[in-house]
Amino acid sequence: MDRNIVPMSRRRKRGRHAATGVQDNADDVDITPRARFVPPPLSTASSSASSARSNVTKRSASPIKRLADTLLQLRPIVLQNMSTIPVGRTLPGDLPVIASVLRRVSRGREVMAESRRFDVKEVSRDRSGFAEIDADDAFATGPSRDIWGTSPTAAAVAHIVEMATECDREGLSEAHWNCFVHAPLLQLALQAKDSAAQIQPHALVEPTRAGKPGDRKVVDFVICLRPNQLELDAMRTHAARCPPHETPTVNQTWHGPLQHCPIVVSIKTKRPGEGGDQAMLQTGRWSSAQLTKLTQMMRQASSSSIDDDGPIPPLPLLVVDGHQWIFWAAAPSTEVAGQTNVWGHVSLGNTSAPLGVYQVAAALQYLAHWSTTVYRPWFFREVIPVKEVRR
């Protein structure tokens, strides 16, 4: 397949969906613990949770103000509401279609294949959470659901719910949630590994008032594209044009495994009820940097300047607040040069219940499908052109 969920460990082997991660700043005490580390025993969960709450408390007073401060910068970040668009305005690019599909998913409509009905019915005898699924319209009546990917088994979904419930009940750390809930759910939906990433090219991120780079701890997982040989050759041609002092990369990070795998979907996780504002600040800066990088590469590809509101597709962002998965999308403003609009939001599903897990899995599979069928042809036509794109 073409899409990856990238791990941030250089020693990991890449599977069918490659995973890649960034761990270049081992001395950075603010870097979120990554799921690739063995988590502490459950007996230490209370101290881990207390430490996490302490760190968030130190930062929680600033994210909203810092997001507002970007309005005075050259590349401001503005939150937009998809549900309250003024008359005469439209959502950018494919966002109306994406939002429509994900809203249907969020209502639990056709989130799994009809072939899973017997599987769910069998499990529902012992697990009450599955009984409600068999009674609603969660099953697809046609083959459209299978196009996105294979629906998870009921046993696998039950395990995700159990682990999420335990993490919530025990007040476990973000690393526990990533290791035992989010990474397995991503692997279940996309057959890929966990990933984490940081912004490495600080020139892509607006500095703070003190002139220091913005947050370097950004996202926990990404879904990216694995290039075929033809596309990789085009990337080499692009890399050969980079200045000698720059490390060639197609993303807003210099992390090795991501230098040649275009990022499409970025995922930021937090413990339940913790750091939602901080997550929006981080993903806002991350997506703004990505839009800046894409604009730079498009200018290089066309050998001419393009407008800041060029035809860049919306960049899907997923913010995970404990059980809850929420969809946002970043896109360049068509009205203010350099401005990044972060459009939201759609609540996709909740891992505290089986139906919610099926909803999240379906949303992930749909976004991965969109990544390969819509974003990939655009990227290798407009950003790093190739003569032919094999699908």
Image: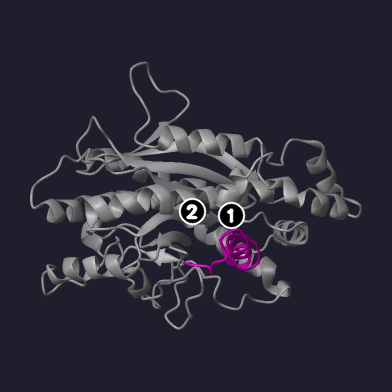
Location of mark 1 (residue): 149
Give the position of the C terminus as an image quadrant: bottom left
Q: Quadrant of residue 170?
A: bottom right
Task: Give the label, 1 or 2, closer to the camera.
Answer: 1
Q: Quadrant of residue 176?
A: bottom right
Is residue 93 visible in the rendered image? The answer is: yes
The extreme right residue here reads 125
Q: Is residue 334 above or below residue 76?
A: above
**SS for callout 2:** helix
Residue 238 position within the rendered picture, expressed as x and y whole percent measured from the top left = 18, 65
Residue 118 position within the rendered picture, expressed as x and y whole percent measured from the top left = 82, 51
Q: What type of secondary structure mainly makes up the magenta span?
A: helix
Q: Residues within 10 Å of mark 2 (few under 14, many from 20)?
A: many
Q: Residue at x 34, y 34 (%)?
A: 92
Task: Please say whether residue 244 is one of the residues in the magenta stretch.
Answer: no
Location of mark 2 (residue): 368
Q: Amino acid at mark 2?
A: Ala
Closest to the observer, 174 or 314: 314
Answer left or right for 363 relative to 95.
Answer: right
Residue 215 position within the rendered picture, expressed as x and y whole percent measured from the top left = 35, 58
Q: Residues within 10 Å of mark 1 (few under 14, many from 20)?
A: some
Task: Please say whether residue 187 is one of the residues in the magenta stretch.
Answer: yes
Answer left or right for 378 relative to 164.
Answer: left
Is residue 285 visible in the rendered image? The answer is: no
Q: Which residues are magenta?
A: 173-195
Residue 157 position within the rendered picture, expressed as x and y whole percent measured from the top left = 73, 57
The extreme left residue here reads 304
The extreme bottom residue here reads 11
